[in-house]
Amino acid sequence: MNSILLAAVISFAVAMILTPYVKSIATRMGVVANPGGRRIHTRATPLMGGIGMYLGFVVALVVTVILNHKLSFDHQTIGILVGATYVAIIGILDDR
């Protein structure tokens, strides 16, 4: 299977599986967008959905690098992981 297609399938599957769990955790922690003000929601909407997408990306990247012997964890790959992690942390802090 093509590495790009494999990464896309893995990322999609992981994000789809984890999103309901992230939604549940956000609701329990009270990290929700309440209606009113500039919000157009009619009820409380859980935030932190980016965590599921981030984890899907990381899992897909790691699995693809492990399975494809032409790829490696070089400086670019590690830089992308560090950058994505930084963006995910900022997103979580912003949602809280």
Image (tube, rainbow, N blue to C red):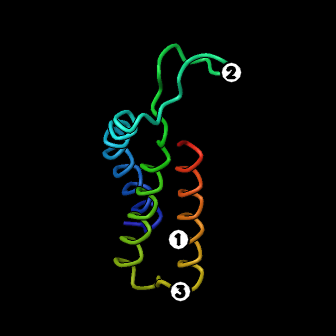
Question: Residue under circle 2?
Answer: 38
Distance from disc 2 to disc 3, alpha carbons, whole Å, reads 44 Å
- Image quarter in which the N terminus is found: bottom left
- Judge left or right: residue 73 versus residue 35: left
Front position in the image: 71 or 32? 32
Q: Where is residue 80 in the image (x, y as percent from the top left)?
A: 58, 71
Q: Work out whether mark 3 precedes mark 1 in sequence or the reverse, and give the earlier one.
A: 3
For the point 52% across and 50% down, the residue is 92
For the point 31% across and 45% down, the residue is 17
For residue 67, what is the image quadrant? bottom left
Q: Which amino acid does label 3 sit on?
A: Asp
Q: What element carries label 2?
A: loop
Q: Which amino acid does label 2 sit on?
A: Arg
Q: Where is residue 2 in the image (x, y as percent from the top left)?
A: 42, 67
The local crowd at label 2, few if under 14, some if 14 to 19, many if 20 or more residues have their Cα within 10 Å, is few
Q: What residue type is labelled 1?
A: Leu
Q: Position of residue 12 (x, y in %)?
A: 40, 49
Q: Work out whether mark 2 precedes mark 1 in sequence or the reverse, and give the earlier one.
A: 2
Distance from disc 2 to disc 1, alpha carbons, whole Å, reads 34 Å
Residue 81 numbered mark, or none: 1
The local crowd at label 1, few if under 14, some if 14 to 19, many if 20 or more residues have their Cα within 10 Å, is some
Question: Residue under circle 3?
Answer: 74
